[in-house]
Image: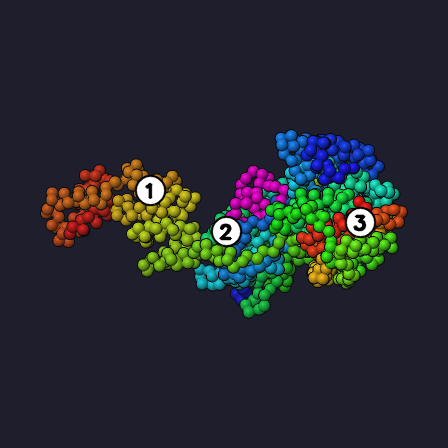
């Protein structure tokens, strides 16, 4: 969506990602989404009197991996307490990092070539989760509130971008690229719908060339769609406000997904004084060079590198293929495509099958070996399966796994190997020498004759393209 | 009453049993607890079960542990599974922890028998135990006087022979000062020597758990049992429990002591006289004692009353009525929290929460909390310089002997000053103990304080033993 002429939006994003650790940040409780409420809890993550935090080393490693992937400086850091009262925060303070974060000063390059700076990526603990019953569904005016502390103490990394984003589309691209990086580092599963990645957007507007305007922070955007809609809504709201002679107040705003609007949560004057101070129950965190080096060495390729690796295998890719590459890498399907290409499958066909058939059922990928995918694409390519049959076989493999040839057989699909088709074609050449000689002389129509003969012999199970391939091979 | 060391010998030899020692202790509690108000809760059932387990261990051929059959009193700010734990506050009334503090686990492993939970100033904030929401504890040596605080109940348990040993916690002197007032050994170990896991925090960077006893050896045995690295406490020192009891009789020959001017200035004459006697006793035992000054120590009290309340304001935030303890209903959750905290906390706790909140507030942080941290660093450096010249520092534990009820309750500053000599050790994270030496006015005991760098406990205990012998005990 375009802003009115002469206006520009300035956006910075704060992305919270839950780290994919086995246990919570400061205790041994399971870090698991979807358990029965208040079952993954202990004195530490319930903040019981006397309990003390002990830092999870794995959370530190994942935070360092994120920092390394975002080209940040990894530095000695400290933990602070952020003090405020809220019922889903059991200690009534959150352990976070303040003036000395573990990662600072990095950047993220987007697909369109633009670069967004990363100010910091710091560690902190998640809060519990409140459910407000009755009233508006928010804490004030609710009849009752229920708190689930399973999420309390789950490790988070908060990634703060610079104010470098200039459109909702760019914000979406940033969030999407970041999500890919978080998944690639193994730090997060990137599941926005489960709240494992949550976004706050700082939005301001200005007339092109002016200094930055006053910003508003929109809290808890839980999908890329909400992110785009909320930013566009908020930028337009601010422009209209200024056009009408008003001024933007610095405040925190809530995004209402159903109404498609932002509304005031609290103004700057109402903002909490968090009274940050060093967490005395934890010691300083200073990962040594060797530890950092181990984390960097274990880091796999990031999405941008993976896209480049895939594009390098495509001869003269048209833009539709470049789009498909983005989808494939975004969904982590590139290993299947590369394996198929390595097995001599057609690069374009492998990419198309991944971008369509595999992308449609990513949860089924656990059932699909690289080998089975490559085999299916090769069968299609050799004409042993029609494209419709190949898609059916892939669908079956994603559902339940198995052997592509066996599935094709069970489905009653073309079971003739190119060998068998070849034998059949040779027999037909002997039986029909006149037709063969006309075909050899360039009468393409005669191909239909031979296809018809093969179809008759195979009761329609043969693949026309395969027959033509055999005929051409003998011309 | 028998010493803990004697009980261990008797229980191991079959002369006595853990159960018999516990019953003797319970009898003493029943006889005097109503008058002195030492225990807030006596866990007869749990203690009998613990004693029976020790007797079984011995019957099975074991030695029963380093504290086999020793009854011990626990300050009521340490968590013990299923046993009411209140911090002497209405806000925790009725709460029973679902877990043991590390010190409780270690005591049970060592064969000690926790008898019950003792009175304290609410959340360990105070110097007389008069700030307990459940009423004050009386000094067993003179019931018109305070036992000191905040660990007044634990001190009184030992002074009244209810138990031979007790655990207290010391944030600014809360073990050493009541030990002095009740004529006991009281130890503030090096920060990190004893796990704080399960100790309900007052000021996390200052709190340490330590023992009370009548004899130097008994405190050594208890400290050895509870000290050593705990993976549940990130600030816990990395090494295993040090050997202390084996060094109690090492003496002080050739060791250098420094009498610190700032740790006696302002003390009453009767207290000063005993500190001087102690210096003479150390010299007679072969020590070299010099006088020295550490001016930075004068800043300790001011820094402490910013740092400790700041941490407390955060540590005590969790008492909000949402999850446990007391809840006073309100129209919404904010009103409920306000009503709960208004009703649940006493005046001194509220005063310190306000002080600490203010000290950490935007615009004031640098001038108050930030400045206090700088003073703290200066104090650590100043102690470090002093320990280049001497091994051990000596001073008074408290400026006065035990005072009368109500003497200082109207003036918080006067009360705070009773910890002026003990606070610097907490700020520096170092070790100190109070050893009774002679008496002052009205025959009330005087405590002499011995201070050393971190991990110097063995040396402090040896010096304390020298004074114990010189004092005719």
Give the secondary structure at mark 2: loop
Classified by dominant secondary structure, the portion drawn in magenta counts as loop
Magenta span contains residue A43: yes
Foreground of the two, A140 or B68 = B68
Q: Position of residue A326 (x, y in %)?
A: 41, 55
In the picture of the structure, the residue carrying the numbered disc 2 is A187
| Residue mark closest to the camera, 3 vs 1 | 3
Give the mark nearer the N terminus: 1 vs 2. Answer: 2
Foreground of the two, B298 or A135 = B298
Residue B102 is tagged as none
Residue found 75% across the figure and 31% down from its top: B23
Residue B470 is tagged as 3
Residue found 58% across the figure and 68% down from its top: A211
The crowding category of the residue bearing disc 3, from other C-alpha atoms within 10 Å (few below 14, some 14 to 19, many at least 20), is some
Left or right position of A213 against B158: left
Disc 3 from disc 1: Cα separation? 94 Å
Give the residues drawn in magenta, as a range: A15-44
Foreground of the two, A14 or B466 = B466
| Residue mark closest to the camera, 1 vs 2 | 2
Query: Is label 1 in contact with label 2 (beta carbons under 8 Å)?
Result: no
Outermost residue, right direction?
A: B442
The image quadrant that residue B357 belongs to is bottom right
In the picture of the structure, the residue carrying the numbered disc 1 is A393
The crowding category of the residue bearing disc 1, from other C-alpha atoms within 10 Å (few below 14, some 14 to 19, many at least 20), is many
Give the secondary structure at mark 1: helix
Magenta span contains residue A187: no
């Amino acid at each position: 969506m375009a802003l009115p002429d002469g206006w520009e939006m300035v956006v910075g994003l704060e992305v919270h990602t839950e780290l994919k650790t086995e246990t919570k940040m400061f205790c041994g409780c399971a870090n698991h989404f979807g358990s029965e409420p208040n079952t993954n809890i202990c004195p530490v993550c319930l903040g019981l009197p006397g309990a003390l935090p002990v830092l999870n080393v794995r959370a530190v490693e994942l935070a360092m991996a994120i920092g390394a992937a975002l080209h940040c400086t990894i530095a000695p850091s400290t933990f602070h307490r952020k003090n405020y009262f809220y019922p889903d925060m059991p200690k009534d303070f959150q352990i976070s990092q303040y003036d000395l974060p573990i990662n600072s000063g990095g950047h993220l390059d987007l697909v369109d070539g633009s670069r967004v700076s990363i100010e910091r990526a710091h560690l902190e603990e998640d809060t519990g989760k409140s459910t407000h019953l009755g009233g508006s569904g928010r804490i004030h005016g609710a009849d009752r509130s229920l708190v689930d502390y399973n999420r309390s103490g789950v490790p988070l990394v908060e990634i703060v971008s610079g104010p470098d984003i200039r459109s909702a589309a760019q914000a979406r691209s940033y969030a999407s690229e970041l999500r890919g990086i978080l998944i690639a580092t193994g730090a997060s599963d990137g599941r926005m719908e489960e709240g494992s990645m949550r976004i706050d957007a700082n939005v301001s507007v200005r007339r092109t060339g002016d200094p930055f305007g006053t910003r508003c922070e929109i809290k808890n955007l839980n999908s890329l769609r909400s992110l785009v809609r909320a930013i566009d809504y908020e930028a337009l709201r601010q422009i209209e406000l200024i056009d009408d002679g008003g001024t933007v107040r610095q405040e925190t705003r809530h995004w209402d997904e159903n109404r498609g609007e932002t509304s005031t949560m609290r103004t700057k004057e109402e903002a909490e004084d968090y009274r940050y101070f060093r967490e005395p129950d934890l010691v300083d965190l200073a990962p040594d060079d060797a530890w950092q080096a181990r984390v960097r060495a274990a880091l796999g390729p990031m999405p941008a590198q993976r896209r480049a690796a895939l594009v390098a295998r495509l001869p003269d890719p048209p833009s539709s293929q470049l789009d498909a590459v983005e989808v494939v890498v975004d969904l982590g399907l590139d290993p299947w495509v590369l394996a198929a290409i390595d097995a001599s499958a057609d690069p374009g066909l492998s990419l198309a099958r991944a971008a369509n058939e595999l992308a449609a059922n990513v949860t089924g990928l656990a059932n699909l070996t690289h080998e089975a995918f490559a085999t299916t694409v090769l069968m299609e390519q050799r004409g042993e399966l029609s494209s419709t049959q190949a898609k059916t076989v892939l669908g079956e493999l994603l559902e339940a796994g198995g052997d592509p040839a066996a599935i094709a057989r069970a489905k009653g699909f073309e079971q003739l190997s190119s060998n068998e088709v070849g034998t059949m074609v040779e027999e037909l050449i002997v039986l029909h020498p006149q037709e063969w000689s006309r075909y050899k002389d360039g009468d393409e129509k005669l191909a239909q004759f031979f296809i018809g003969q093969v179809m008759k012999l195979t009761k329609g199970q043969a693949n026309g393209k395969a027959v033509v391939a055999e005929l051409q091979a003998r011309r | 009453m028998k010493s803990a060391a004697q009980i261990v010998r008797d229980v191991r030899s079959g002369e006595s049993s853990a159960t018999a020692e516990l019953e003797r202790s319970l009898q003493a509690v029943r006889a005097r607890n109503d008058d002195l108000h030492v225990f807030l809760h006596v866990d007869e059932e749990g203690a009998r079960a613990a004693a029976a387990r020790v007797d079984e261990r011995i019957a099975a051929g074991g030695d029963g542990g380093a504290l086999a059959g020793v009854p011990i009193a626990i300050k009521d700010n340490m968590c013990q599974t299923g046993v009411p734990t209140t911090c002497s506050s209405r806000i925790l009334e009725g709460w029973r922890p679902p877990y043991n503090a590390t010190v409780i686990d270690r005591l049970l492993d060592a064969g000690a028998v926790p008898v019950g939970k003792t009175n304290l100033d609410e959340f360990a904030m105070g110097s007389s135990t008069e700030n307990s929401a459940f009423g004050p504890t009386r000094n067993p040596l003179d019931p018109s006087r305070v036992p000191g605080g905040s660990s007044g109940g634990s001190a009184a348990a030992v002074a009244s022979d209810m138990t031979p040993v007790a655990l207290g916690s010391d944030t600014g002197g809360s073990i050493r000062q009541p030990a002095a007032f009740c004529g006991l050994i009281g130890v503030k170990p090096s920060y990190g020597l004893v796990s704080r896991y399960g100790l309900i925090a007052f000021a996390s960077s200052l709190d340490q758990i330590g023992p009370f006893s009548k004899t130097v050896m008994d405190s050594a045995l208890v400290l050895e049992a509870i000290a050593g690295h705990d993976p549940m406490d990130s600030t816990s020192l990395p090494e295993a429990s040090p050997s202390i009891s084996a060094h109690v009789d090492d003496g002080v020959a050739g060791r250098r002591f420094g009498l610190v001017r700032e740790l006696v200035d302002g003390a009453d004459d009767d207290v000063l006289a005993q500190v001087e006697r102690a210096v003479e006793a150390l010299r007679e035992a072969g020590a070299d004692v010099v006088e020295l000054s550490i001016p930075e120590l004068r800043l300790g009290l001011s820094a402490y009353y910013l740092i400790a309340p700041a941490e407390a304001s955060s540590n005590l935030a969790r008492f909000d009525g949402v999850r446990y303890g007391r809840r006073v209903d309100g129209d919404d959750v904010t009103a409920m929290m306000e009503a709960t905290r208004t009703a649940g906390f006493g005046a001194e706790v509220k005063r310190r929460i306000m002080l600490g909140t203010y000290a950490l507030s935007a615009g004031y942080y640098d001038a108050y909390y930030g400045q206090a941290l700088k003073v703290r660093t200066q104090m650590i450096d100043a102690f470090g310089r002093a320990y280049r010249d001497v091994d051990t520092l000596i001073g008074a534990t408290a400026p006065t002997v035990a005072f009368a009820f109500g003497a200082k309750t109207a003036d918080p500053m006067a009360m705070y000053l009773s910890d002026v000599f003990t606070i610097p050790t907490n700020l520096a994270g170092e070790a100190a103990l109070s050893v009774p030496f002679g008496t002052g006015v009205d025959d009330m005991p005087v405590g002499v304080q011995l201070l050393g760098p971190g991990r110097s406990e063995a040396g402090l205990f040896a010096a304390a033993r020298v004074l114990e012998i010189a004092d005719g005990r």
